[in-house]
Image (spheres, rainbow, N blue to C red):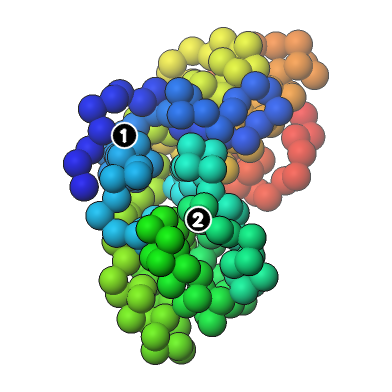
Amino acid sequence: MAPSMEKPRQLPLDLSHGTAYSRDDLVVSPSNAQAVALVDCWPDWSSPVVVLAGPAGSGKTHLAEIWRNSANALAVEPARISEAIADLGSRPAVIDNADAASIDQQGLFHLINAVRGAGSHLLLTARRFPSAWNVTLPDLASRLRAAATVEIHEPDDPLLAGVITKLFADRQVEVEPHVVQYLVRRIERSLATAMRVVDRLDRVALQQQSRITRVLAAEAVSAMDEGQGEFDL
C-alpha cells in the first residue's frame, strides 16, 4: 500500500472547543504514519477488509471516523452486525472495537461476504490482531486471515506534543513549549490522557486567572496519578 504524499497536520480529537474529525486537522508521526496512509489511499486498498490494530489511546477511533466521513461508510455496532446488513447496500462499513467480547461473529461473517460481493470495503478497529480475537467460527477466522492488517502504535513524543499544543490552541490558550514537553514526558502515552490533562489545566488556569506554568502542569500530572476527579487547589 503506497503511502500518501500529502503532509497531514493534526490528529483529530472530539472536543467541544472547535476540534473536528477533519482530515485537514491531522498530524502524522512515525507512530501513526502507516494508519494515516491507509485512510489517505482509500479506495485503492489492497483488500476489501482492513483491520486497524493498536493499543487503547492510540487514535484508532479518530482515524476510523475520518474514514467513515470520507467514504460515507455505515457505522456498525459489534454486537448488532446482523441487523445492519439490510441497511448496507453497496456502502462501505466500519466497526470500531471489533475485538469486543460481544461481537456478532455470524453477522461479521455475512457482513464480510456482503462487502466483498458489492465490491466495497470494511474497516475494523481493534486493540489486537485478528489472530487474537478468539474467533470460534471457522469460516469467519478464514475471512479474517485474508484481511489486510495495519498497525498503529501508541503515541510517540512528536505526536503527543503536537496534539497537546493543538488542544491548547483550540482553547485559545498559549502555553510555553517547555510546559508541553514536561507533559509529554510525564503523562500516560494516550491521546485520551492528553485531552484530560489539557482540560484540567485549562479549567484550573481559568479558576485561578493564571497562566499555565510548569508548576501547574506538575500539579495536574500529580492529581491524575492519584486518580483525583477534579483539582482541589
Q: Which mark is residue 29?
A: 1
Q: Nearer the viewer, residue 167 or 6?
A: 6
Q: Which mark is residue 90?
A: 2
Rendered location of residue 6, percent (x, y): 29, 25
Q: Amino acid at mark 1?
A: Ser
Residue 89 appears in the rendering: yes
Q: Amino acid at mark 2?
A: Ser
The residue at 56%/58% (across/down) is 89
First in sequence: mark 2 vs mark 1 = 1
Q: Secondary structure at mark 1?
A: loop
**Quadrant of the rendered structure where residue 30 is?**
top left
The residue at 25%/55% (across/down) is 46
Rendered location of residue 13, percent (x, y): 56, 34
**Quadrant of the rendered structure where residue 158 is?**
top left
Sort mark 1 into few (<14), some (14-19) or many (20+) by Cα contacts within 10 Å. Answer: some
The mark lying in front, picked from 2 and 1, is 2
**Distance between the Cα atoms at labels 2 and 1?**
34 Å
The residue at 72%/46% (across/down) is 228
- Quarter containing the C terminus: top right
